[in-house]
Amino acid sequence: MPGMDEVLATRRALRASRSQSRANVVSVTILLGSVLVALPLMAATQNPLFLLLFLIGVFLSQSPKIAKQWERAVVLRLGKYTGLRGPGLFWITPFIETITIYIDQRVITTSFAAEETLTSDTVPVNVDAVLFWMVHDSEKAALEVQDYAQAVSWAAQTGLRDIIGRTSLSDLLRGRERIEAELQALIDQRSNPWGVTVQSVEMRDIVIPTSLQDAMSREAQASREKSARIILGQAEVEIAHLFFEAAKSYENNPTALHLRAMNILYEGLKEKGALMVVPSNVVESMGLGGMMGAAALRQQAMTDANPKVASPAV
């Protein structure tokens, strides 16, 4: 499963924070002090009362506890909740009061995934996401749920599957921000009674089947080709409309038509080695014979002056 290493690392860290037997410098100092004082005196005097001093030192060494700055210790007295302790040094009554758990109040990241989950349009997808959450109420986290870290992980996974089942593939691919906000609200609603609040949810990856990826690629290519043809057709319509308007302008203005014909000849003959084929009826209707002859004479004169210039065929 994607993100399994992160999940295991998170659980190991949380289990380490729940360790009840935590050695600290204060308890070790008390224990060593009782050993260094009681045992030499008992060996020197052969008085068994110093053994009692050693046992008292062992008893007292179980009393001091230390919680880190980001931790809160849950203390039970004969099985009944008495309160939270920490951070720093605090004292408990040995064998009467016990510390059941150290609650980590930092922001915790949990990776979770939904594998082979069907969307609303029956498409199997694999979704990998990351949850950022923290404990805001240590008392509820200790008393209201057995394992709050595992409960949050399962709530995130089931919430992700629920949202995927109600979302189409297109909305899942295009609306990540909306889905992340909806998933955050859903997980937060489930975990708030446990004293846990969700800060954000981020979807890292969405994997769809390879065959479906190929089909979607072909569909997108066909859609782009369709759009290109529509744009080309619209351009042809606009060009035809402009030509129609230009024909209206030339219809009753022979001078403008001849000027346009001269411009066409100029554009065609100004390139070296150009070849123009003009239908005879165009020459007769537009009076291009005289203009083409003049152009040919000009080209011949240029050729005689510079034999390296090839005369274009008309």
Image (cartoon, grey):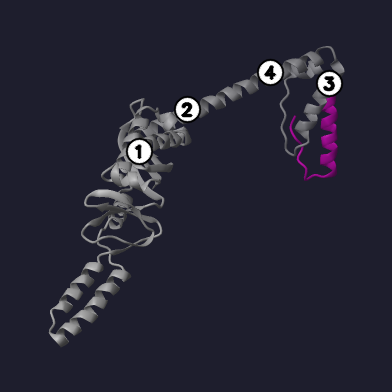
Q: Is residue 57 left or right of residue 180?
A: left
In this orientation, does residue 195 appear? Answer: yes
Q: Which residue is mark 4?
A: 240
Write the residue at 35% across / 46% down.
111
SS for dot 4: helix
Query: Looking at the image, is mark 4 or mark 2 earlier in the sequence?
Result: 2
3 or 4: mark nearer the eye = 4
SS for dot 1: helix
Where in the figure is residue 230, as x and y percent of width and height?
Answer: 57, 22
Query: Looking at the image, is mark 3 or mark 4 earlier in the sequence?
Result: 4
Amino acid marked by disc 1? Pro
Amino acid marked by disc 2? Ala
| Front residue of 206 and 275 | 206
Q: Which residues are magenta?
A: 288-314
Q: Which residue is mark 3?
A: 258
Query: Looking at the image, is mark 4 or mark 1 earlier in the sequence?
Result: 1
Can residue 254 be found in the magenta stretch? no
Residue extending farthest to the bottom is 44
Quadrant holding the C terminus: top right
Where in the figure is residue 161, as x and y percent of width and height?
Answer: 33, 34
Where in the figure is residue 44, as x and y percent of width and height?
Answer: 16, 87
3 or 1: mark nearer the eye = 1
In this orientation, does residue 1 appear? Answer: no
Amino acid marked by disc 3? His
Could you tell me what secondary structure mostly forms the magenta stretch? helix
Q: CA distance from mark 4 to mark 2?
A: 27 Å
Label number found at residue 193? 1
Q: CA distance from mark 2 to mark 3?
A: 46 Å
The answer to which image quadrant residue 297 occupies is top right
| Front residue of 310 and 44 | 44
